[in-house]
Image (tube, grey):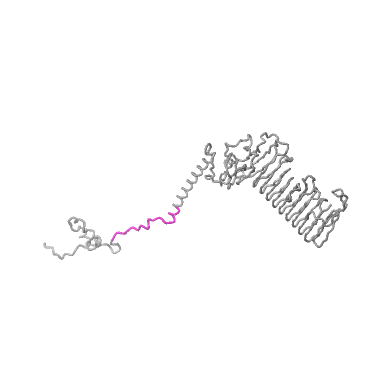
Amino acid sequence: MIIADDTPSSPAKAQQPLSAQRGSEGMPPPPAYSGPSTNFARDPQGYFPRPSEALLPPVSSSTDEIEPAGRRFFKAFGVAFLIYLLLGLFTRSTIEVAYWGRGRLARIDLSFQINHDEFGWPLHTDGKVVRCVKGISDWNRVQFEESSTASFELPLSADVLYLFARGSLSSGSVTYVQDTDWENNGTVRVDVAAKYGTRAVLDRVSVCQLERQEGHSGIGILSPLNWHTSPFERFVFDVTVYFPISPHISPLRIEAFETKLPSFSQRVGDLHGEVVFGTLSLQSSNSHISAESVYADRAMIRSSNSAIKGTFHASESLSLVTSNAQIIANITLGHNGANSASTQLTMRTSNGAIESDVNLISTSPSYTGGSFNVSARTSNSHLTLDFPQSALDAHLDVDAKTSNGLATVSLNRAFEGPFVLQTSSARPIVQFNQHVEDPTDLHRKRALSYSENTGFVKGEVTWSRPGYRNGGVNVRTSNAPIVFNLL
């Protein structure tokens, strides 16, 4: 049989893609064609694709296998958060080991490592760390009590002694007393008692002896800056400061003593004039300050939202300042006559009464004269000033002001000078006793002159010396009367 050259090519060959033909050029020839199978002969349609079938095999779409972007983001975020959590736990454990480390680590400043929101520890600005009590093992536990104690000694030779507290767990009370049994008269002893619900909280706090600068020696009561406890984790400090007995006949003198103790009440015991402060500064907030007896050249007592009460003696200045609470004080001001500056008394509050007795004493050789300036201001409450004792020929200036409350000022018979009384919707009341005895025993007569308008009185009181001015008094209020006593 002769096969003609014009035999048509195989349909399968005619359907091959061009790329397949090009790719076969560099490959060896396929095996010899064995001819169509018998099935082809029986069923020619089996060779050709049906109308509903594609000529090429389907290409799988890769987009069907890609995970949605949102799901991939959340998976990555979860992994990152887990790493962050593990790293945080590791870092915290490392800090705790360093914080509670003993030996060499206990002597260096670790504040750069400490998370102050979780642990109480000195800052760089607190100065040199002399000694710290930290962790359960450093405290002395009191048997049968949920309490631990520590004791410190501050040198009296320091220029400034100070106490301060910082942190969310730092609160309690401080008491200042003189201890006749304290044998080391060159130091001030500070005893700290920590009272707690669970001992674990004790690991969060520290009490440190510090030197913020040369010549300054103090105690810092430190706790986490941001730490919230449960009712079972109550925590409070009770601090007692013991001043020694003076080794000399004269009183013990402390040049400067300062406190900054938010949320601590402070009470000064009766020091009987045996301890005299050059400068005394007691500061608190949301807690009261009281004093049975305080002697100082300069004293500043400050709180907020709590009362100030007590007996105070000052030779140069005294400041009692609070807010939303009363001031009740028995005050003695001294002046030596040689000092050109007046001895200053300042009392400030708001929404609370001022009730004060002020005695004016001259420490000059003649016990006469002296210069005093008294300022008292409050609001929405009454104000009462009484001057039961005054040196002869003392110069006294008084400025007393309140609002929506009665103002009462009672002057000592030794006072001579002008006065101004001013109020609204009420008439000032002047009570005068012209038969009171002459404080100099010279049988002088007391004279009063004044003029008044609605809510306003202006006048002066003298001892047989019209026009003699030895100070002045200014009293103001609103919506309430004024009572001015010259008895």
Question: Residue 198 appears in which quarter of the rendering?
Answer: top right
Q: Return the x and y of residue 108 as percentages of the image width and height.
A: 53, 40
Left or right, 188 with reference to 336 = left
**Residue placed most toward the observer, 423 or 66:** 423
Q: Return the x and y of residue 39 as percentages of the image width and height.
A: 21, 58
**Residue placed most toward the observer, 40 or 196:** 196
* Residue numbers of the magenta segment: 56-75
Find the residue positioned furthest to the left. Answer: 1
**Placement of 73 over or under 149, stated as above or below:** below
Left or right, 406 with reference to 192 = right
- Can residue 28 be seen by looking at this rendering? yes
Question: Quick one: quadrant of the N terminus?
Answer: bottom left
Q: Return the x and y of residue 393 as percentages of the image width and height.
A: 80, 50
Question: Residue 17 appears in which quarter of the rendering?
Answer: bottom left
Please give the name of the residue rendered at 75% of the width and 57% of the height, measured from the top-left corner.
404
Left or right, 483 with reference to 349 = right
Q: Return the x and y of residue 250 as percentages of the image width and height.
A: 73, 38
**Residue placed most toward the observer, 122 or 66:** 122
Find the residue positioned furthest to the bottom. Answer: 6
- Can residue 483 be seen by looking at this rendering? no
Please give the name of the residue rendered at 85% of the width and 48% of the height, measured from the top-left corner.
440
Left or right, 108 with reference to 191 = left
**Placement of 113 over or under 48, stated as above or below:** above
